[in-house]
Image (spheres, rainbow, N blue to C red):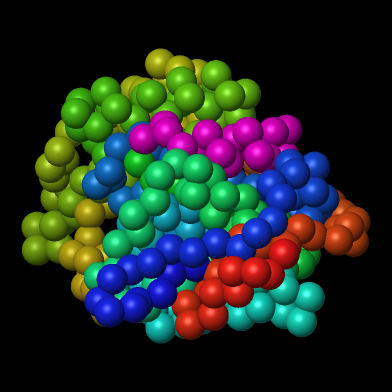
Amino acid sequence: MSSNQGGKIKVSVQKAGPLDTGAIAQAMKGIKTKFAIMSGKGGVGKSFVTASLALGFAMRGYRVGVLDADIYGPTIPKLLGLVGANLYLSEDEKIIPAEGPFGIKVVSIDFLLPTDDTAVIWRGALVDRAIKDFLGSVLWGELDALFIDLPPGTGDAPLTIAQTLTNELTGSIIVTAPSDVSRRIVQKAIDFSRKVKVPVVGVVENMCCFYCPDTGKTYYVFGKLIGKEMADKYGVPYLGMIPLDPRIGEANDLGEPFLMKYSTSDTAKAILSIVDTIIAMYKDKLEAKVETATKKQVRSLLRLPGEEEEEQGES
């Protein structure tokens, strides 16, 4: 995909036809539920929520995958303790996901970058192609749930996911912080979901408050229940709230999954309560039997670092 030659980052692609949405749907047929995690706004902890939901489902015994669709700012590998992991190609040129805690299958552009500070400088068409490759050219196998971590906004990546997985997405999970500034932007993600006909699973209010261990008091640092008000306004479920916890930042910086390191904390219990709510909402789908996709997948355009460029004369 990208190579480092003379200090310059070079993006290269292989020749191949466009990935067909029908072929992608067939390739992902073994995945029972597919959740897109959206916020519309950066800085609300969307990726942390994605990683935590995936871990929560896995801790409950479900087979889980995570697609990091934030091409420009991938953070899922760090949050799941997978920095330095690699993606591999199978003999038939399918992408083999990295494996995280509890067997979580993870695919991210971060695994393909040669250094931590390598920027992905792509226009929308290449982002679109990369996401389609990650959907349809990956050996996801049979999963109970796939969590798709989307970048902020309602542009190329969310639109590609929504259009490529038309009628396939179980729904979008909207993440907000409890402030009017966040609400004004995050509510656009609800509007986006409705316009592209993606069901809204509900709203998660992250950084809702701070429980002071010294006094036992609860402090609403940014605002109070603004996520709940937004959910009520748009008639969508309020999935729950996650409090501020200094240990979250500590665990994230160390690359140690918070939900595993502090599994008995009040914050972990709040996260698992949200997990259990979503599981209860989709219990039938999670327990349903599905047919494994057998249709041949299209050759990927992505090129792993270190691969030689095709000869100019090759057809």
Q: Does 207 appear above or below 153?
A: below
Q: Does 213 appear above or below 220?
A: below
- Residue ID at (53%, 45%): 128
What span is colored magenta in the figure?
153-171
In the rendered view, does 23 fall on the left or right side of 121?
A: right
Q: Nearer the viewer, residue 8 or 294?
A: 8
In the rendered view, does 165 fall on the left or right side of 260?
A: right
Q: Nearer the viewer, residue 45 or 203?
A: 45
Q: Residue 25, can we see it?
A: no
Q: Does 80 appear above or below 272?
A: below
Q: In x, y percent, where is residue 189?
A: 42, 29
Say if the magenta span includes residue 275. no
Q: In x, y percent, where is residue 231?
A: 42, 25
- Residue ID at (59%, 46%): 35
Q: Nearer the viewer, residue 199 or 213?
A: 199
> Residue 91 occupies which quadrant of the picture?
bottom right
In the rendered view, does 27 fall on the left or right side of 300?
A: right
Q: In x, y percent, where is residue 223?
A: 17, 33
- Residue ID at (79%, 60%): 297
Q: Farthest residue toward the front?
A: 313
Quadrant in which the C terminus is drawn: bottom right
Q: In x, y percent, where is residue 94?
A: 71, 71
Q: Nearer the viewer, residue 118 or 50?
A: 118
Q: Does 202 appear above or below 109?
A: above
- Residue ID at (29%, 27%): 185
